Image (cartoon, rainbow, N blue to C red):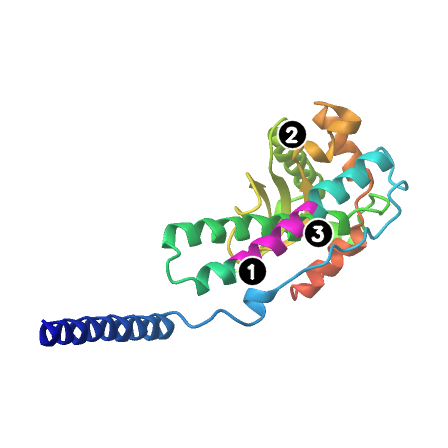
């Protein structure tokens, strides 16, 4: 019985050693297949940009509305994006994270990134007098026939989004070398490669405090506060002269 006990003991020890070796090998293979997430793409943490104008200085858009929009919607998206960015690295480093779970985080990252950047463009193109200069008017007319035709379409897109969600965006399409107005249902539906020039938020949070469901009045107020110098600068940064 003593010899049998020894043989049983050694067989058990060998089994444990084999299992341990297999686990180590499996872990090494997993490490080779999925290196630890590191680098700026996984560590990005963003701070909210301050408003480029006094929150109470816009005509027809109240300080309460602007401050709520900046603090709750824009800053909220910045915080959410930072949280998702941290979760991505954790999920990628965990070998047992299912691909569909990881892609759920990537979808949220896409939406939050769009929200953050579009809000920054939105606030960045407000705080002006609403009067487009001759050069930018000429450039817009070159694509739309007339400046008034552009504005008519831009307003119509915004009106069509009223009561729901989305963005109206004037953008430069470098592939077609043309300025176009775009209808965006959410934060992630912009045409590939397009440079946003003028961004109008049509989510209800951007106007409901002041205008309820009166979308047209909000659009009037937005247009009256456009900072056209910033729009022209965005076009120049895209490599296009405003008067070209």
Q: Earlier in the sequence, mark 3 or mark 2?
A: 3
Q: Residues within 10 Å of mark 3 (few under 14, many from 20)?
A: many
Task: Name the foreground residue: 40 vs 87.
Answer: 87
Q: Is residue 20 left or right of residue 203?
A: left
Whether label 3 touches label 2, CB < 8 Å: no
Residue positioned 74% across, 31% down in the render: 207
Q: Residues within 10 Å of mark 2 (few under 14, many from 20)?
A: some
Residue positioned 49% across, 51% down in the render: 105
Tag 2 secondary structure: helix
Residue positioned 63% across, 41% down in the render: 168
Residue 244 visible, this orientation: no
Which label belongs to residue 174? 1
Tag 1 secondary structure: loop
**Majority secondary structure of magenta residues:** helix
Q: For mark 2, what is the residue?
A: 159
Q: For mark 3, what is the residue?
A: 121
Residue bounds of the magenta highlight: 76-87
Q: How far across and down, in percent of the image, does residue 66 sit?
A: 80, 39
Q: How far across and down, in percent of the image, does residue 142 sit?
A: 65, 51
């Amino acid at each position: 019985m003593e010899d049998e006990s020894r043989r049983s003991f050694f067989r058990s020890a060998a089994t444990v050693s084999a299992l341990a070796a297999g686990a180590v090998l499996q872990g090494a293979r997993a490490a080779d297949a999925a290196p630890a997430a590191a680098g700026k793409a996984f560590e990005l943490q963003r701070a909210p940009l301050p408003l480029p104008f006094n929150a109470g200085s816009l005509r027809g858009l109240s300080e309460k509305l602007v401050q709520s929009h900046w603090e709750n919607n824009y800053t909220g998206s910045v915080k959410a994006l930072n949280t998702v960015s941290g979760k991505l690295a954790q999920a990628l480093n965990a070998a047992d994270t299912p691909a569909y779970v990881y892609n759920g985080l990537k979808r949220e990252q896409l939406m939050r990134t769009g929200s953050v950047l579009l809000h920054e463009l939105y606030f960045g193109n407000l705080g002006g007098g609403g009067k487009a200069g001759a050069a930018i008017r000429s450039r817009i007319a070159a694509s739309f026939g007339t400046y008034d035709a552009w504005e008519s379409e831009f307003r119509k897109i915004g009106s069509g989004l009223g009561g729901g969600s989305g963005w109206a965006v004037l953008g430069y399409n470098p592939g077609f070398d043309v300025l176009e107005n775009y209808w965006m249902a959410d934060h992630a539906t912009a045409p590939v490669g397009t440079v946003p020039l003028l961004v109008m938020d049509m989510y209800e949070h951007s106007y409901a405090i002041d205008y309820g469901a009166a979308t047209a009045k909000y659009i009037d107020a937005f247009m009256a506060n456009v900072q056209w110098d910033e729009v022209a600068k965005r076009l120049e940064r895209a490599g296009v002269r405003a008067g070209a």
